[in-house]
Amino acid sequence: MGTLAEIVKRELAWYASGGLNSKAILLSNEEARVYAVNVYDYPKHELPAGIAVMARLEGEYIVIEEDRTTKPIEDRLMAAGIPRDRIILAYAGEKLPDTHQN
């Protein structure tokens, strides 16, 4: 199955592919435990680059800060064996349990 970080990176990497007029790359900060996929126009740069999906680890929770995809990352994470109660959809207003707040 892998560590929580490995699972998150693997599932986010699925979104890091090129489109017809765009490219997407996986970004990670291991120290901060933050992972994201950045999308940008390619070969022409007509729109600003932006984050398609972003997650961070907080203890044993995965906090999804952004998900602008049509195939939600939470579905991929659950299919990979992560229980839904360990996934926090911060972009949708969900909060970490009080014992895990910063």
Image: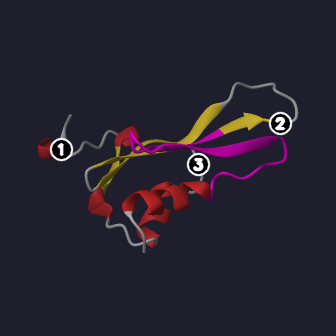
Label 3: how many residues lie within 10 Å, few (<14), some (14-19) or many (20+)? few
Looking at the image, the residue that sits furthest to the front is 31
Q: Quadrant of the C terminus?
A: top left
Which residue was labeled with disc 3?
Answer: 69
Q: Upstream in the sequence, badge 2 or badge 1?
A: 2
At mark 3, the secondary structure is loop
Residue beneath the point at 87% across and 35% down: 43
The amino acid type, in three-letter code, at marker 2 is Tyr
Measuring from the top left, give residue 23's x and y in whole percent: 76, 43
Magenta segment, which residues? 14-38
| Distance from Cα at disc 2 to Cα at disc 3 | 19 Å
Question: Residue 95 versus residue 42: which sits nearer the camera?
Answer: 42
Q: How many marks?
A: 3
Lower sequence index among marks 3 and 1: 3
CB atoms at circles 2 and 1 under 8 Å apart?
A: no
Location of mark 2 (residue): 42
- The quadrant of the image that shows the N terminus is bottom left
